[in-house]
Amino acid sequence: MTGDRLAIEVSHLTKRYGDITAVRDLSFTVEPGAVTGFLGPNGAGKTTTMRMVTGLVSPTGGTATIGGQPYGRLTHPSRTVGAVFGGNAFHPGHTARDHLRVYAALGGHPDGRVAEVLDLLGLAEAADRRTRGFSTGMRQRLNLATALLGDPRVLLLDEPGNGLDPEGMAFLRTLLRRLADDGRTVLVSSHVLSEIQQLVDDVVVIRRGELVTAGPLSRLAGPPAVLVTSPDAEALAATLTVGPGPVPRVETVGAGRLRVHGWDAPGVADHAAAHRLRVHELVTEHTGLEQLFLRLTTDEVTTR
Ligand SMILES: Nc1ncnc2c1ncn2[C@@H]1O[C@H](COP(=O)(O)OP(=O)(O)OP(=O)(O)O)[C@@H](O)[C@H]1O
C-alpha cells in the first residue's frame, strides 16, 4: 500500500554563516517514489541544505518544504520525515533495543514498532547487545532504524555509505529501493558519485552551495563518443563536418586519431566506407560517471 507522496521542494534557499555562503539561491525538487542522490564535493553545502529541510538550521533566505509544508509546520514531524546525519547519539551501555525504545517513546510511536525496525534493518540478532561493541555498519543500521521508527514518508540520509562494506551497501540498496517503491521520498547525500551510483535513480549535483545539474542519473552521462583510428583521419574529419544533414563534432586527438561526438560507431563506419576512406579501429567511449561528476564539480568546467 502506498500512502502520501510528499515531494521535498527547495526554493531559492540561501544560508550564510558570517562571510561564508554555505548555500546560495538553491532550488530543486526531490520526487516521491525514487531514490535521489544529493551530490557535491566536501563543503558544497549538502549537510547544511538537509539540515534546513529538517528544520535544524534556519535559512537566511528562501524556503524548504515537505509536501508543501515547512518542517516546523508538519503535524507529525517524526511520522513524516526520518533523517540520519553523521555521528550517533547512542548510550554505549544501552542495547539497540533500549535505544529504539527510548526514541519510540519520545516520538510517540508504539513499542511494537521497535521489533519491526530491528527486523527491517537486519538487527534482530544484535538487538540485546550493548551499542558500545557495534561496528560502523551496525551503527549505521541502528541510526536508520531510529529514523524509520515513525514509518516516515520522507527519508533524508547524510552520507549513508560512509564506512559500509559491500554487503552493507547491498543491504542499503535493497532497503532504499523498497522504501522508494512504496512511494516514499528518499534523499541520500554523498561526495563520491561511485559510492551511491548503484543506489540512486535521480541526482541533484551542487557545488559551492549552488545547483550544477539535476535530473535522472541516466541522462547525466550523455551520448557516447567514438574514437576513430584511421590513416585517412584528416580527410575523414573534413568529410564528416560538411553535411548534408546533421554533422558530428569532431576532435583531433593526435596523428591519425579522431574523437567523433554525436554519431555512433556504425554511422562513422558507413560514412567512411561511402567516402572510400580507411578505418583501422573504432572504439565507443562511454564517459565514466565519476569522471563526469568530477568535471561537473571542479572549477575549470563549464556545464551543459
Ligand atoms: N555552523 C557553521 N558555521 C560556519 N560555517 C559552516 C557551518 N556549517 C557549515 N559551514 C560551512 O558551510 C559550507 C558547507 O558545509 P556543509 O557541511 O553543508 O557541506 P557538505 O557538502 O555537507 O560537505 P561534506 O561533504 O564535507 O559533509 C562549508 O564551507 C562549511 O565550512
Image: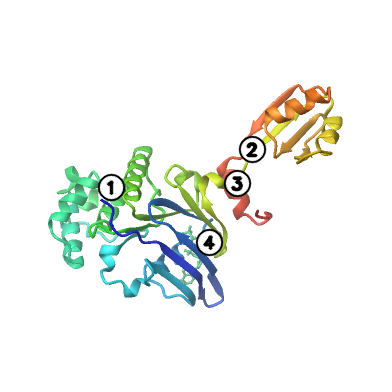
Q: Is the distance from the Cβ of mark 3 to the nearest ligand 1 atom less than 8 Å?
A: no
Q: Which of the two marks, 3 or 2, is nearer to us in this view?
A: 2
Front label number (4 vs 1): 4
Looking at the image, is mark 2 or mark 4 earlier in the sequence?
4
Q: Nearer the viewer, mark 1 or mark 3?
A: 3
Question: Mark 2 — residue?
Answer: 224
Q: Is mark 1 within 8 Å of ligand 1?
A: no
Tag 4's secondary structure?
Answer: loop
Q: Which residue is mark 4?
A: 44
> Does dot 1 land on a helix, a strand or a loop?
helix
Residue with the most extreme front position: 244
Instruction: Identify the amino acid type marked 1.
Output: Met
Q: Amino acid at mark 3?
A: Leu
The answer to whether residue 147 is seen in the rendering is yes
Q: Are marks 2 and 4 in contact (CB under 8 Å)?
A: no
Amino acid type indicated by mark 2: Pro
Identity of the residue drawn at 17% across and 55% down: 113
> Is the residue marked by circle 4 packed among few (<14), some (14-19), or many (20+) residues within 10 Å?
many
Query: How far is mark 1 from mark 3, CA to CA?
Result: 32 Å
Which numbered disc flags the more N-terminal residue, 3 or 2? 2
Mark 4, ligand 1, within 8 Å: the answer is yes
Q: Locate residue 213, reporting x and y percent.
A: 57, 56
- What residue would you read off at disc 1? 138
Residue at the image point whose x is 20% and y is 46% from the top: 119
Disc 3 target residue: 292
Q: Are marks 3 and 2 in contact (CB under 8 Å)?
A: no
Q: Residue at x 55, y 72 (%)?
A: 20
> Can I make out residue 230 in this image?
no
Label 2–label 1 contact, CB within 8 A: no
Q: Are marks 4 and 1 in contact (CB under 8 Å)?
A: no
Tag 4: residue type?
Answer: Ala
Residue 203: % across, % down = 49, 52
